[in-house]
Image: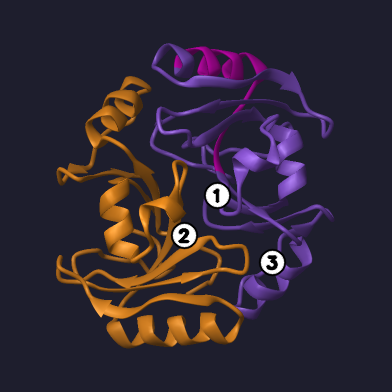
Chain colours: A orange, B purple
Amino acid sequence: MKMNRVTLITLAVEDPKRARAYYEGLGWELDSDMGKAVFYKMKGLMLGFFTLDGLAEETGKPVEELKTGAMTLAQNFGSEPEVETMFAKAVEAGATPVREPFKTDWGGYSSYVADPDGHLWEFAHNPFMTLDEDGLVA
Amino acid sequence: MKMNRVTLITLAVEDPKRARAYYEGLGWELDSDMGKAVFYKMKGLMLGFFTLDGLAEETGKPVEELKTGAMTLAQNFGSEPEVETMFAKAVEAGATPVREPFKTDWGGYSSYVADPDGHLWEFAHNPFMTLDEDGLVA
């Protein structure tokens, strides 16, 4: 599996309903609406809109630090141990640990690091997401 | 061509060399290094790291508004008129114009809008980028 991939782009929004109205007004086709988060499937990756409060809670970063315009990028993996390996590898490479690997309330396993410029990356295992052999969203 | 796509993710960085050291330390394979911008090819899209000053100049937004952690998402199109159509469509749908369509110094045609939460989207035509029938980076 190549490292050159992103499987989820998350944009913090004030109101997911407003985000839906805007993006669907542009012609985006909805994949799923979970209330505080909405998702759009692309070829090989997803674009998600998540409430700023929800993202703050999820990442453990206070809202004031996320600011309007906050985004995270995610790489998904096929198992929990791979998440832990990736998290350790990133920290070793110079990332700042933001949230140690943890069991999520949606049944997955996740972690967050900040790259050297503060960009948030999530390394996660989502048992409900199927990845193809390239590590892309199937 | 579907609307559900992103062809370029840009992360503002302090020092592209430092970004390279970090991402290549993680196993990312470089596509090209343009000095103030470096690019990584993914399946169907690119991830770019661009100096904060360069991104500020490119988007016309002052550095103080971009902040550490600034990102833009791009959708590329096959022609200049399509960029203008998309720009107008986005503004009509509620986007704030950030930079009207303009000829770039690298031979392309670009524009920027901010979505309702302030996320920057670039709508661009890059004559050097080949798009497949799905509008993905070929």
Q: Which amino acid, mark 2?
A: Val
Q: Of the residues tagged 2 and 1, which is closer to the observer?
A: 2
The magenta-colored residue range is B72-89
Residue at mark 3: B19
Q: Which amino acid, mark 1?
A: Leu
- What crowding class fits label 2: few (fewer than 14 Cα within 10 Å), some (14-19), or many (20 or more)? many
Report x, y in % for residue A12.
37, 45
Identify the secondary structure beneath mark 2.
Answer: loop
Residue at mark 2: A6
Report x, y in % for residue A78.
31, 77
Report x, y in % for residue B76.
58, 33
Residue found at x 24% / y 63%: A129
Residue found at x 27% / y 60%: A57
Residue at mark 1: B45
Magenta stretch encompasses residue B86:
yes
Q: CA distance from mark 1 to mark 3?
A: 19 Å
